[in-house]
Amino acid sequence: MSLADLLVRFSDRKTFARGIHPPGNKALSAGGAIEVLPTPANVVIPLHQHTGTPCEAAVKPRAALNIGDVVGRSKAAVSADVHASIAGSASAVTAVTLPNGRRSLAVPIKAGAPKAEPGAEPAPAPLEGRALFDDLFGGDWSLPATPPEPAAILEAIKSAGLVGQGGAAFPTHIKLTPNPAKPVSAVLLNGCECEPFLTADHRLMIEAPEPIAAGLRLAMRACGASRGVIAIEDNKPDAVDAMRRAAAACPDIDVAVCQTKYPMGGERQLIVAVLGKEVPTGGLPLDVGVVVVNVATSAAIARAVLRGRPLTHRVVTVTGRGIVRPANVLAPIGVAISELLKHCGGLTTDARRVVAGGPMMGFTLADVEAPVTKGTSGITVLTAAEVESAEQTTCVRCGRCVDACPLHLVPTKIAQASKFGDWELARRYDIMACCECGCCAYVCPARVPLAQHIRAGKARIMRDARRK
């Protein structure tokens, strides 16, 4: 057994072998309460905010809408409905560039008076400020004496259009649907938020622990799990305390404190660190009887099941040394990222790059008018000093990328195969197993963009597979 494995085994904090320790930069945005973005004049609701088949527009131009009305549906098995995040009127379907660089059809909505139903009282004005936050996350989140049946929970989650809010955006109702051949023993709630700079999940655990805990109990009931574990890195002691208090009355839920290490929030790393189970290469957490759910998704589950509310808003970290006033902002889905930047004081004079997500796995934005989606966890603005790096040189076969890879892959071989289009060699070295965490590129002394080569190769392989 290696020294690294011994340290993992005997540490009092849950962890995994390998990984890296980049600067966290969490203090920029972790200290302030979640702010609420004022209702924007317009939003653009993309019809493809999830893994799977895009939705089709379900409203016609000039249709009056209330918050929560369905604007996009899909009959495909793997998909998730999308809903209006503001009241107003729909415009003709258009095309937008998403934060990840892909194109999607979208339904624009112009803010206006809430839709009035014939013969009904006028709809109340939409909530603003802290009243909106309290409406979404406040109040009593106790489960009823007779909890909803699993089928009802899954239907509520599906109707609400829930997807994983940690980044992958996989439809939540599919993830929680029981598979008789692969029973689930534990639901692992991911509160690690290991990506540098980002603190949206951290603040949500502090300010809204009750709906998060309630959502975990509902997720456990939906998939038949007997155990729930809330995993939080040890750089968030206030979140650990808040979640322990919220789960204190639930004997089947534990809080696991993990070492601060990147990428602790990755499903495969988190499962082996907390539960001691290793997901097989090419497999899924379900193969070892585990379902992993993000904490923001858990709160949305509670809201969907207990209050019948769809996913219309999410908390986004707007941070970095290139933004005047970093903050965590509750924003309507579909609002332009430029509105978030403006809310936080705008860019500094030395801002050079705006990233959707964090610096390790995020996407550089070509256009800040791109809309916030269900999977937009943060916006990081980097300065010139942070962007400038040493000139790329030739790989010297030092092996640092191999030592750092948490999945025990050989990133340099995979990246080279991808760069030169040798897909047979790329598959031989398990290119599709790569989680694109960026550890390899971070430690590379030659500054070879290994993760970018691998990500491009995976996209090419998947595109070719779809064509076939």
Image: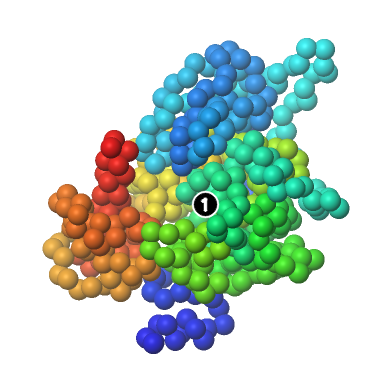
For this rendering, which residue is in front, 196 or 223?
A: 223
- Give the number of callouts: 1
Residue behind mark 1: 166
Residue reaching furthest to the front: 181
Query: Which residue is at a point 38% across and 63% down the rendered structure image?
Result: 281
Q: Position of residue 41 (x, y in %)?
A: 57, 25
Residue located at (39% from left, 54% from top): 361
* Viewer can see residue 318: no
Q: Where is 14 relative to 424, above or below?
A: below
Amino acid type, residue under disc 1 in the picture? Gly
Secondary element under disc 1, as helix, strand or loop, is loop
Q: Is residue 77 left or right of residue 21?
A: right
Q: Nearer the viewer, residue 434 or 226?
A: 226
Q: Is 434 positioned to the left or the right of 191 in the image?
A: left
Residue 210: which quarter of the image?
bottom right
Q: Using the image as rendered, state which of residue 283 and residue 113 is in the foreground.
A: 283
Crowdedness near tag 1: few (<14), some (14–19) or many (≥20) residues, C-alpha within 10 Å: many
Please provide percent x and percent y for residue 260: 50, 71
What is the x, y in percent for residue 111? 61, 22
Q: Residue at x 17, y 71 (%)?
A: 397
Q: Quadrant of the N terminus?
A: bottom left
In the rendered image of this protein, does residue 220 appear above or below residue 323? below
Location of the C terminus by quadrant is top left
Left or right of 376: which side holds 38? Answer: right
Residue at 68% x, 64% y: name it: 226
Furthest residue to the right?
145
Q: Is residue 213 left or right of residue 186?
A: right
Pinpoint residue 424: horizontal percent, then vertical percent.
19, 54
Above or below residue 138? Residue 253 is below
